[in-house]
Amino acid sequence: MQGKNILITGGAGFIGSNMVEKLLPDNKITVIDNLNNHVGDRFIKSFSGNKNFHFINADLLSFDYGKLEDIDTVIHFAANSDVRYGSEDPVKDFKNNVVVTENILEYMRKKDVMDILFASSSTVYGEASIMPTPENYGPYMPISSYGASKMSNEGFITAYSHYYGIKGSIFRFANIVGKNSTHGVIYDFINKLLKDPKELEILGDGTQRKSYMHVIDCVNSMIYVHEKLKKTDIINLGNLETTSVKTIANYVVKRMGLNDVKYNYTGGINGRGWKGDIKITHLAIDKLLSMGWKSKYTSDESVDIAVQETIEQLKNKN
């Protein structure tokens, strides 16, 4: 992916900002972001002096896509990404995830932009009965409005692919961790322990178990796979291993140099952290591996490195 004009939606956020950093040396990058991720432009400020970087502060629900020119590829990260609070306002997920994606696809159709990389999610599977879960598992029965919105987006992308010849690389993420994260279990644990280094509230029962992938492996694998694919396809992104919530707590406590921290489990519904939380997520990555991809970090290594990165960033922020 070189010498292209690339639009990255949500490019000021967690994964988006890492993608900008990866692609900017060899491409022209336009980022559209409404900066509602509570960190403003902190993660992309360093790119502002680069002649190949253009930032647009806008809401994608109302943005005039006619202002964009000469885009070759869209990398679509923008979404309401806080799965935990979806039950409080599911319409927010519909508008910011489904309607925004449809707006982008309409722009692509009208301007003959033929490439899109889309950040989907393992939440489309719901509570899968097959572990590790392959891409052809079904029926999909998401248990969160976030998962439902991602499932809908996938459908629109495949429909536009059939109608208009757009190539869509649809990536179902496991749990992505690493620098520039703004929420999630690692971020929450560190913030809680900064406030009270003696006790840690853990949502659920601590046995929740998921596959974690470092954000560097995530963005690199997205680019790698998209260049390999000849047509629209769906790819699971993750690792062969899983990591439990309690293990993550142990990594955080160790890296913060704490001792004798008391873990207080909330219990939740059948050990879940919240309504819509999937207790165990483990994606089959046979398709990814068959394409020749190998992650740099295992699930546990991804978590440990992400803990270190997040502690350092929160320390510098304060």
Image (cartoon, rainbow, N blue to C red):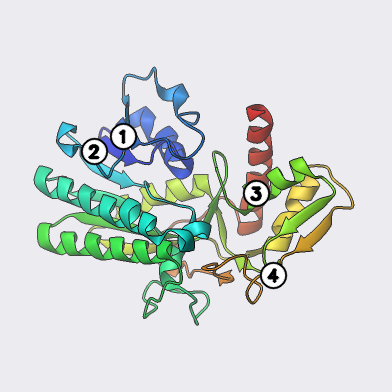
- Give the CA separation, mark 4 to mark 2: 43 Å
Please report the residue visible at 27 percent of the width from the left and 37 percent of the height from the top: 6
| Quarter of the rendering occupied by the N terminus | top left
Asked where in the image residue 287 lies, by quadrant, the reply is bottom left
Give the spatial CA distance, label 3 vs label 4.
17 Å
Tell me which label, 1 or 2, sits earlier in the chain.
1
Q: Pick whichever of labels 3 and 4 is earlier in the sequence.
A: 3
Q: Is residue 69 visible?
A: no
**Residue at numbered disc 4:** 207
Query: To which residue does mark 2 refer?
Result: 63
Q: Is residue 63 above or below residue 44?
A: below
- Tell me which label, 4 or 2, sits earlier in the chain: 2
Is there CB contact under 8 Å for labels 1 and 4? Answer: no
Residue contact at pointers 1 and 3, CB within 8 angstroms: no
Residue 284 image offset from top left, x and y in percent: 48, 70
State the image coordinates of residue 136 (x, y, percent, origin top left): 36, 76
Label 3 neighbour load within 10 Å: few <14, some 14-19, many 20+ = some
Q: Nearer the viewer, residue 141 or 252?
A: 141
Q: Which residue is mark 1?
A: 58
Residue 277, quarter of the rendered image? bottom right
Judge left or right: residue 301 versus residue 200: left
Whether residue 268 is situated above or below residue 70 in the rendered picture: below
Residue nearer the viewer, 29 or 34:
34
Q: Residues within 10 Å of mark 1 (few under 14, many from 20)?
A: some
Question: Could you say whether the residue bearing mark 3 is in a helix, strand or loop?
Answer: helix
Q: Nearer the viewer, mark 4 or mark 2?
A: 2
